[in-house]
Image: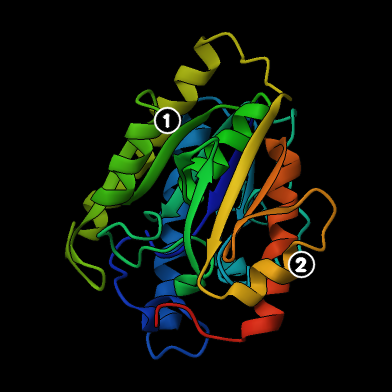
Amino acid sequence: MQVYISADMEGVTGLVDAEDVQLGGRDYAHGRAMMTEDVNAAVRGALAAGATRVLVNDAHSTMRNLLVDQIHPEAVLVRGKPKRMGMLEGLDGGSEAVLCVGYHSRAGALGVLSHSYMGHEIEDMWLDDRPVGEIGFAHATAAALGVPVVMLSGDDAACDEMTAWDGTVATVAVKYARDRFAARLRPAAEARRAIEEAAAEGVRRAAARPRPTGADGPVTLAVRWQNASVAAELEGIPGVTLRDSRTVLVTGPAPQLFRLFGVFMRVAASLTGQHPYC
């Protein structure tokens, strides 16, 4: 049984500020160690529940955050960028369950380090008119590939967002948001035990249930940008239309849109060059 882990950083145990999660931040080295330990807890849980292979995708920012020499020895790591499928690189029908570690709530939510992919540059996103962020988009893409998301860790806002999207997913709140850059922290050892237990629970559920068939029907992605020039540039991509001067629309199967969205972000980055969390 292969289990897939997508590892983000903002929702990792103990981390609350850009200095914790960005390259060059004064506490980034500590953040990397904390991220690695949260991922290792999920790997242990997956293996305890019967996983025979665990594929871990470093999915945050540079995608070179996890400490290679400290990652669980039975995990296979996907590291670096660019990646065609970004935060879901390597996920396909060969996996039977997805674990989302260190995830965060979407743009506009009052969660720790909340945003949707690009800090302030993306104001909002929708899938078929349903508000969505990194959690919902990953879930919808995995479901379309026939692989269920079975566990998520992050702050309480991220857990609530996942539960609203899919109430069957086991969630672990490792911290409780007090504001966008402040939280009440769960003790690290306790948080990692909870991640390990939830990962094991989620993998056992996946093994016991009939596997979803996946769906390749079309969905519509809408992205509202802060900068109208981004939307204007993206309109040049075949199939992309404008809903208004800052909102682009595109329709297709969720995995195809997930990959195309990576192109959107590279176009936006080339036009703005602004740091997230401003």
- How packed is label 1: few (under 14 Cα within 10 Å), some, or many (20 or more)? many
Distance of mark 2 from mark 1, alpha carbons? 31 Å
Residue type, label 2: Pro
Residue type, label 1: Ala
**Disc on the earlier residue, 2 or 1:** 2
Q: Residue at x 65, y 67 (%)?
A: 231
- How packed is label 2: few (under 14 Cα within 10 Å), some, or many (20 or more)? few
Point out which mark residue 153 bears: none
Q: Residue at x 55, y 35 (%)?
A: 128
Quadrant position of the N terminus in the picture: top right
Would you name the residue on which mark 2 appears?
82
Q: Nearer the viewer, residue 12 or 48?
A: 12
Q: Is residue 274 above or below residue 43?
A: below
Q: Residue at x 37, y 47 (%)?
A: 153
Q: Specify whether 206 is left or right of 147.
A: left
Would you name the residue on which mark 1 appears?
200
